[in-house]
Amino acid sequence: MLKIFHDLFTELNSSEVSFCNWKGHSTVGSHLNGGGDLDLFVSLRHKTKFEKIIEDKGFKRVISYQANHDFIEHFYGLDKITNKFVHVHVYFKIVTGEHISKNYILPLEHFILTDLDNSSLLPKPSVIAQHVIFLIRYYLKIGSFYGFLQYQREFKKYSDEWNYINDNCDYKIVEELDLSIECLNEMTGVYKAPNFLRKLFLSRNLKRKLRNYKVRSHFLYQVYVFNNFVRRLLNKWFFKKKKLFIPGIVVAVCGLDGCGKSSLVSALNDNFEEHFSVKTLHVGRPKSNILTFSFNIFIYFYSLLKRKKSLNGETNVFEAPKKISIIYAIRSVLLAYDRKIVTTNAHKLSKKGYLVICDRYPGLVVGKMDSPRISLDSNRSLVYQLCYLIEQKLYKSIKQANLIFHLQVPLEIAIFRNNKRKKNGKETENELRDRFLINSDAVFLGDNYHFFNASKPFKAVLIEATDAIWHSKAWDDTQ
């Protein structure tokens, strides 16, 4: 059992919160070690207390884009020791049915919680309750063509679950649902039998018996299933959304060349994207938008020429010119506009629940990395003055990142790493030295600022950054 689960269950038990692992018993060992999602049932009367405890233990509530149901919530936590994300699927009522619709809410709280097995930190229902829950869930799932297809996808999981709990069981009447001992014995016998038509017939009878606990009428149920099917299909092929935060945050990874920004951005994306909706944006060199595209093509070729001269020793493009050209000033305004657009989009995405990871982020000190480039000079032309004012206004209007990671490494390490990079047109050693000299005191726009010693082994930096994101007070600031 991971420590994060141990701490959570210990606190829940000491606070006398009524809870248990109500299904998925055959795989609970894997779930407690970070594999899959752990299904908990928590008494509705303890909902507020439970939510406070689980959030105090570092869990975050997230939203499923594909399907949300009343009385079901998703919580994710990060186990510090293993750096694993864990998922707790919490039911405050027994909501069940077909995989997509979960069209039944059953009054089984008393039945489940009155005779719990408390032999471990994670309580579980009695053997009778485990059997009854399994049978009800099974027959409610297979009663339609679509439900049967969904069940077939999970056939092995159900088979393993039954084999895990299938000891001899003397049933008792389930008064809450008016299920007699004879009815439960019949459900068991039919489940074990190979005749699927009998299973289907019994499923129809059970659904008829539980019709008063349906969430949606037959018509609304069909509409829901169709809409959800389309939503899932579109998400699979186009949107590709996973769990969404409430809301997300914008994290920026900044620092001088050779400190490992791009590597950390990529690794953080891979780390979080397995579970959550993540967007990665490059703010240092943003994509051109419709207003800047044409001019940026011209500027691109102009920059290539300047770089060629630089490499021939004629000029140094990384040293701010004493008297910049109008072309340079216009290009600086266009870059400021592109950065304004991409940072605005980053915050819009975060409001929709995305974790947005930015490679670099603007600052405000003129002449520094990712900052304004046009210095104040009252002796220049009106066009120059206008460019200065526009650029200043654009940078000052950029919203701060919720969280800044400022990576720092000694110059010699940056040079060593840069020499090992496989990248076309990468910076020369002299260019890196010039950039370090110019940008050593650069700062970037962020509400929560963290300096990272990026000279440590990369895995250690990644673990530290992942933990810093998950436990940052930036989440609280966005609420």
Image (tube, grey):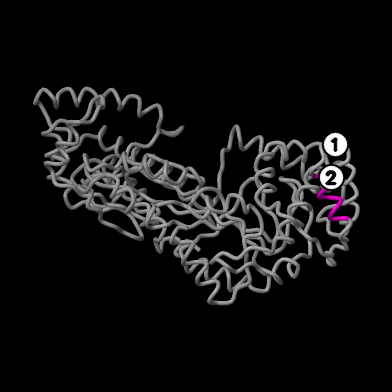
Q: Position of residue 253 (x, y in %)?
A: 32, 47
Classify mark 1: helix, strand or loop. Answer: loop
Q: CA distance from mark 1 to mark 2?
A: 8 Å
Examine the rendered structure and indicate whether residue 296 appears above or below residue 286. above
Q: Main secondary structure of the magenta part?
A: helix
For this orientation, the residue located farthest to the left is 313
**Residue 148 placement (x, y as % from top left):** 77, 38
Disc 1 marks a residue whose amino acid type is: Asn
Residue at image position (34%, 56%) is: 446
Q: Give the camera-side residue of 244 and 206.
A: 206
Image x and y of residue 28, in percent? 57, 53
Q: Is residue 333 above or below residue 87?
A: above
Q: Report the residue at 46% width, 63% height from top.
A: 58
Q: Which residues are magenta?
A: 183-191
Residue 288, picture quadrant: top left
Classify 10 Å Cα crowding around label 1: few (below 14), some (14-19), many (20 and above): few
Amino acid at pointer 2: Val
| Numbered badge on residue 190 | 2
Is 462 left, or right, of 5 in this rendering?
left
On the picture, is 474 further left or further right than 116? left
| Residue 100 colored in magenta in the image | no
Whether label 1 touches label 2, CB < 8 Å? yes
Q: Nearer the viewer, residue 152 or 192?
A: 192
Name the residue beneath numbered marker 1.
195
